Amino acid sequence: MLPDAENAGAFHSLAAALESPATDESPAQAIRRMAGGFAMTQVLHAAARAGIADALGDDAQGAAELASVLELHPHALERFLRMMVVLGLLEQENATDFRLSATGQLLRADHPLSMRNRILYIGAINYPAASAALHAVRTGQPAFDHVFGKPFFDHLAEQPELGGFFNELMKRGVDGRVAGIVQARDFSRANHIVDIGGGNGALLSAILTQASQSRGAIFDTAAVIAEARERLEGTAAGGRIDLIEGDLFHGDYPQGADLYLLSNIIHDWNDAQAATILRHCVSAMPRGATLVLIEELMPEQAADSPATIANDYSMLLLTGGQERTEAQYGALLERSGLTLATVTPFAIETCDDRRKGNWALLECHAR
Ligand SMILES: C[S@@+](CC[C@H](N)C(=O)[O-])C[C@H]1O[C@@H](n2cnc3c(N)ncnc32)[C@H](O)[C@@H]1O
């Protein structure tokens, strides 16, 4: 079982929305808790950006000393540190000195379960995008584009550090799913597996570790392929993986494999864009090849799968995609020249039922 900090995988990071409130919370307390979320995000974000946890390490320090190391305003920092105490991130030793609590330790870059990069990503991406939720609800257009003036993946491509954080979050998500995926399906039956939008290679290398005689290819943007190259170099599976730069919407996908994967891809896009990607897969697939989608299935009732609903809301804010029901996937595949053959649910590794989601492998064939 993965520790919780490792496992909150999804890039949308609406983790706070999934935390169970106290059972005896009154309606007014519930509204106050929700309304205060903005301040908590920014305390975490400012603390991570300023490097407070790394500078404190295992020691207790006063605001004046810390401010001089980090080039911050001493009095303002002292007030900020007190707020970190109130949120449980710091403990106060005496009138002047503060040290990290067990929770605050997770903001250190060198902690084995560090959540620092996740916080930097949320502060730079999710937080500003969420401020335009009303725009998304009014127009149906992604809040992200409204705030940043460009689509989500274009922005990540221009911001290598944030792109790296995103790829790392994706990898953590894959780490929580991969055991369920390889249990749900035997990939060793395929000779050649192409992972379209395969990111930094976390999924394909895990699959090829199981399918030890198979070869594979990852197709993704130039920046992500460069990261995959670095990550996979020297690994056992890496020698069997070709890395191919390309654009999901240009359709130059690698031809001739017997298995194509689209993991966590179709939910990023609206129906028209998703159909374009699926048709490009059909064009690349030889007769008899299989396409496997790895996605969450939208539940009928929101309460049945809170994690799926949170991811769907993130798609509304960030990319304009959506989570879909099995019937919606069936119809989308049908329109794109594919037939849905089997749906195999699988479980992700998590210690928290509310984060489980509703994951499945959707196996399909070109008509
Ligand atoms: C949500 S991530 C999924 C990554 C991985 N497949 C997984 O299961 O975690 C979406 C992937 O699609 C890639 N992507 C987005 N737009 C793309 C485009 N226009 N062309 C190629 N790849 C693209 C991203 O770089 C990213 O690796």
Image: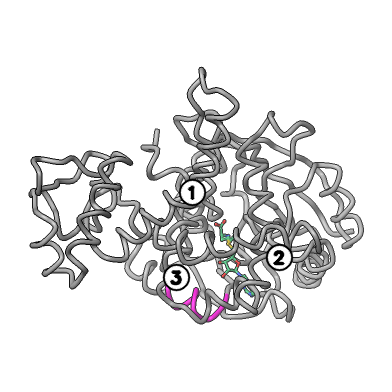
Q: Which amino acid does label 2 sit on?
A: Pro
Q: Which amino acid does label 1 sit on?
A: Gly
Q: Determine which residue is flagged by label 1.
A: 9
**Where does residue 282 sit, x and y in percent of width and height?**
80, 66
- The quarter of the image that holds ligand 1 is bottom right
Q: Which amino acid does label 3 sit on?
A: Leu
Q: Mark 2–mark 1 contact, CB under 8 Å?
A: no
Asked if residue 226 is among those painted magenta in the image, a careful observer would answer yes
Read off the magenta span: 221-228
Q: Quarter holding the N terminus? A: top left
In this rendering, the answer to whether 318 lies above or below 227 is above
**Where does residue 181 sit, x and y in percent of width and height?**
57, 43
Neighbours of disc 2 within 10 Å: few (<14), some (14-19), many (20+)? many
Identity of the residue drawn at 27% across and 54% down: 80
Badge nearest the viewer, 2 or 1: 2
Task: Name the magenta segment's main secondary structure.
Answer: helix
Neighbours of disc 3 within 10 Å: few (<14), some (14-19), many (20+)? many
Badge nearest the viewer, 3 or 2: 2
Q: Determine which residue is flagged by label 3.
A: 162
Q: Determine which residue is flagged by label 2.
A: 142
In this rendering, the answer to whether 308 lies above or below 138 is above
Identity of the residue drawn at 10% across and 62% down: 64
Identity of the residue drawn at 25% across and 58% down: 109
In front of the other: 195 or 26: 26
Dot 3 falls on a residue whose secondary structure is helix
Neighbours of disc 1 within 10 Å: few (<14), some (14-19), many (20+)? many
Residue 218 picture quarter: bottom right
**Where does residue 292 sit, x and y in percent of width and height?**
70, 52
Asked if residue 67 is among those painted magenta in the image, a careful observer would answer no
Queried on whether the Cβ of the residue with tag 3 lies below 8 angstroms from ligand 1, the answer reads no
In front of the other: 26 or 188: 26
Residue 221 picture quarter: bottom right
